[in-house]
Amino acid sequence: MNANVEAVVIACPRCNGLNRVPQARLADAPKCGKCGAALFDGHPLALDAAGFHAHVERAGLPVLVDFWAPWCGPCRMMAPQFEAAAAQLEPRIRLAKVDTEAQLALGGRFGIRSIPTLVLFRQGRELARQSGAMGAADIVRWARQFL
């Protein structure tokens, strides 16, 4: 690989292994070098603490995280919209979901006080936050303004 080709580190959705992929090849259906899984499938990932560490803190791709809970009506209403946004934003932005009931520490760590709350991260740092349910077009528009 040419040393001048800029690569991004992407965590695998199946094994959390880290992969270096040239920016120009992100749309070419890259696969994990460790397990062979597709690195992108157009669907949000469900993250636990280990997955959050791999995808948000160690990988270089921006990650839009939906902090939600199963009992939350607006969260359930937004879920298909978030799914539709994933198909439009990948591979430039990874979309992920954190169940704040199952991952109490993650919700507490980021001070999630209302759900659904979207938080956009890049290299482990929070870039932006938006609370409340949104439609797919609004999610896409909101996320793209920070790229």
Image (cartoon, rainbow, N blue to C red):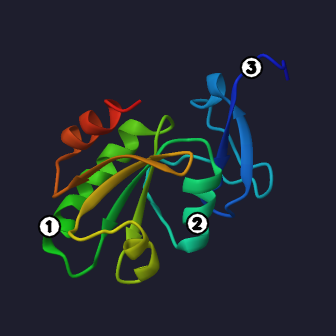
Given residues 45 and 6, the one toward you in this image is: 6
- Residue 115 position within the rendered picture, expressed as x and y whole percent measured from the top left: 22, 68
Q: Please, what is the three-letter code of the amino acid marked with disc 2?
A: Gly
SS under mark 3:
loop
Q: Please, what is the three-letter code of the amino acid marked with disc 3?
A: Val
Q: Seen in the image, is 77 located left or right of residue 28?
A: left
Q: Seen in the image, is 116 located left or right of residue 144?
A: left
- Residue 19 position within the rendered picture, expressed as x and y whole percent measured from the top left: 73, 45
- Residue 75 position within the rendered picture, expressed as x and y whole percent measured from the top left: 21, 67
- Residue beneath disc 3: 5
SS under mark 2:
helix
Q: Seen in the image, is 89 located left or right of residue 124?
A: left
Q: Earlier in the sequence, mark 1 or mark 2?
A: 2
Q: Please, what is the three-letter code of the amino acid marked with disc 1?
A: Pro
Residue in the image at 55% along x and 46% along y: 40
Question: Badge 2 local density, few (<14 within 10 Å), some, or many (20+)?
Answer: many
Numbered mark located on residue 51 in the image? 2
Distance (Cα) linking label 1 and label 2: 25 Å
- Residue beneath disc 1: 74
- Residue 52 position within the rendered picture, expressed as x and y whole percent measured from the top left: 54, 64
